[in-house]
Amino acid sequence: MKSITLLLFCFIASQCMGQLEKERAIMKTLCSPAFDGRGYVRDGMNKAAHFIGEEFQKTGALAAGNNDSYFQKVTYQVNTFPGIIELSSKKRAFEPGVHYLVESYSGSYNGDLKLKSIDIFKLINKDTKELQKLEKLKGNMAILLDLTPYHSRDTVGLFHQISSELAQFRPVVLITNEKFMWSVGRSQKKYPVVLVQDSVFNNVKSIHLNVENKFLSKFETKNVVAKIPGESSDSCFVFTAHFDHLGRMGTEVYFPGANDNASGTTMLISLADYYSKNKPKFDIYFIAFCGEEAGLVGSKEFVDHPTFDIQRIKFLLNLDIMGSGDEGITAVNGTIYKNEFEKLKDLSEAKSLLSVVKPRGKTQNSDHFFFQEKGIKTFFIYTMGKNKAYHDVFDKYETLDMGKFEDLKTLLIDFVNVYP
């Protein structure tokens, strides 16, 4: 009897390991240089969309986009950096993504610049003389702002806002000691704004700056939508995750976006694979959204022009940052849908799946939001743990242990199974 139990345990363990290896392979592919950070340069986002559609097809999930395809077209404007990105002083060349970032709304510039330090508080107070000084600056001059003495988030945020305004007539260099976090730009200023780490920028008086941007007024991409038919089609359950990330900042640097959100995209595909082998009680849809990092544009397009009746949705689970979990998970809207949250927490405790299931209130920071605004019940679930890299070049496939990935998938499946 013991030998039978041991054999059964070994079989289950091997199946789980095989599944995790499949999931790791998908995630590694999504994070690879071939997809260019799933952004706007070299068509990385659309390459990723077609890969995800192929993966859904492999699971047996049906196409649920427009025109009997897996896709729904989405178009929006975005600022990109497909060319050279260089920053150097007389003593050294700085490493993009590590030593400096070009702000996402930056325009192009190529040339040598002297740095002119200014009193930013005079600008805040709209000091007329200080503004006139800036307007009268001659020659190749960049405005230098040192943010390191300031620790208030509001103050630093205000300085960033002012620097974007200054970039309409001069390049701007911001010195910071904060962690870098890049983003997607939806507008374009005339000149670049460069954020530089103070640890590598001591006593620099002049620089060479080369930034090539390209503003795309009509970037075309797509959401990816798939379906597993259930025993009943009267209602449906929906899993969502955004597959896009930040893409490339120049020819040398890309942002892999492993935890954010190759992990959530991989979870979508893995869940589709599970339900293709285990018929659900009701229809289940899987939506991989584009353009989340650009302001939730993919999910907004879907809610405005859905490819199926979204009023049939019993519950929607939006999955973002699925690669950690050693410190548990957070469920956004957990304080709103209290009964559903308690069920989620009880299911986790019953099988000792996650150490913490934490509730949070309403947010607007991911793709659940526009569904929520339509009165659809949603949770936005993200993991907590040691993987802290976020919107930087260090969010790599190699950094994620995925130690709680299978447990989290079990919890999601259990939640769907017991949902009334």
Image (spheres, rainbow, N blue to C red):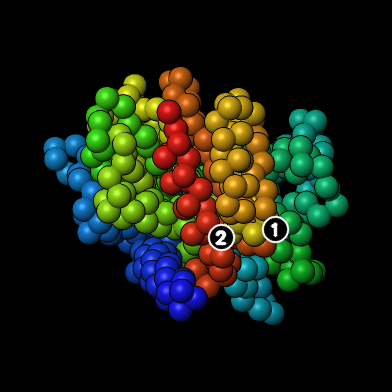
Residue 143: numbered disc? none
Q: Position of residue 10 (x, y in %)?
A: 44, 75
Q: Secondary structure at mark 2?
A: loop
What residue do we see at 62% from left, 68% from top? 98
Q: Is residue 316 left or right of residue 384?
A: left
Quadrant for the C terminus, please.
top left
Q: Nearer the viewer, residue 380 or 211?
A: 380
Tell which tag, 2 or 1, sits nearer the viewer. Answer: 2
Q: Nearer the viewer, residue 269 or 192?
A: 269
Type of amino acid under label 2: Lys
Q: Position of residue 202 (x, y in %)?
A: 79, 69
Q: Which residue is mark 2?
A: 404
Q: Position of residue 168 (x, y in %)?
A: 56, 42
Q: Quadrant of residue 298?
A: top left
The residue most toward the left is 67
What residue do we see at 83% from left, 47% from top? 151
Image height of 226 relative to 249, above or below: above
Residue 179: numbered disc? 1
Image height of 268 relative to 296, above or below: below
Type of amino acid under label 1: Lys
| Disc 2/disc 1 C-alpha distance (Å) | 27 Å
Q: Position of residue 347 (x, y in %)?
A: 56, 43
The residue most toward the right is 149
What residue do we see at 73% from left, 71% from top? 200
Q: Is residue 49 left or right of residue 66?
A: right
Image height of 315 relative to 135, above or below: above
Res. 192 visible in picture: no
Res. 273 visible in picture: yes
What residue do we see at 26% from left, 38% from top? 230
- Among numbered discs 2 and 1, the one appearing first in the sequence: 1
Q: Secondary structure at mark 1?
A: loop
